[in-house]
Amino acid sequence: MADPVPGQSPFRDARSPEEDPAPHALLEPVTGLLGTWVGSGHGGYPTLDGDFAYRQQVTFSHDGRPFLHYEARAWLVDADGTPLRPSARETGWWRLQPDGHVEALITQPTGVAELLTGRSGSGSADLVSGQVALTPTAKQVDASRRRYTLTDADTLDFHHDLQAVGQPMQRHLSARLHRTPAP
């Protein structure tokens, strides 16, 4: 059987519970996260020159198996919201377990790979790093906590706490994201 489009996988990722393939039953606690989310946030950290404003896009998708593909990218913006430059970018996988437990692997091009665990349910996921792996030239990151909370069907709040470069665990990023229409 030939690929439907030469060079592309014959298996699509779904970005909503209504798309094929249907979500695996274990994804039920997080089906509300499926889709692409875009919004604005603020960040800062004691080792940075100051606080900053940013925009972020997050996409959650699946291929019918019991895990989510996660992809996020952010860019710094000025006071008027004009994009200044690319900022954070990461991708990963969330593995859902029968009891609502989540195991996540998130990697960043800056040389950081986080293994996180946590719980999902009622439109939220709370993940805490169990291990952080670093390439030889990556900045020191010791731990992180990420919280994703649906405040309504089309609004997702994101909070990222960080313990890095000799600093204690503290807020690094907060954003309010809005669901974008399916393509």
Image (spheres, grey):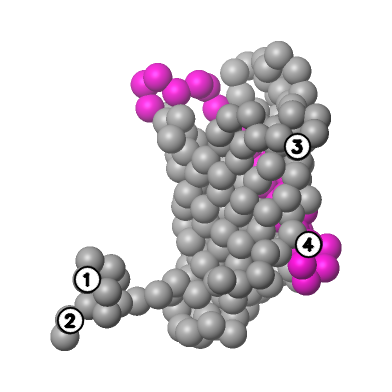
Determine which residue is flagged by label 3: 81
Residues packed near mark 3 inside 10 Å, few (<14), some (14 to 19) or many (20 plus): few
Give residue 6's mark: 1
Residue sitting at 60 percent across and 72 percent down?
182
C-beta proximity under 8 Å, tags 4 and 2: no
- In primary-sequence order, the first of circles 4 and 2 is 2
C-alpha distance separating marks 4 and 2: 40 Å
Q: Is residue 35 above or below residue 87?
A: below
For disc 1, the neighbor class at 10 Å (few under 14, some 14 to 19, many from 20) is few
Q: Which of marks 4 and 3 is in front?
A: 3
Percent x, y of residue 41? 76, 41
- Left or right: residue 6 versus residue 113 is left
Main SS, magenta region, reads strand
Residue labelled with disc 2: 2
The answer to whether residue 142 of the structure is visible from this angle is no
Q: How far apart are marks 1 and 2 (CA)?
A: 8 Å
**Label 3: which secondary element:** loop
Please name the amino acid that badge 4 sits on: Thr
Element type where label 2 sits in the image: loop
Residue 163: % across, % down:
65, 28
- Point 66% across, 58% down: residue: 37
**Identity of the amino acid at label 1?**
Pro
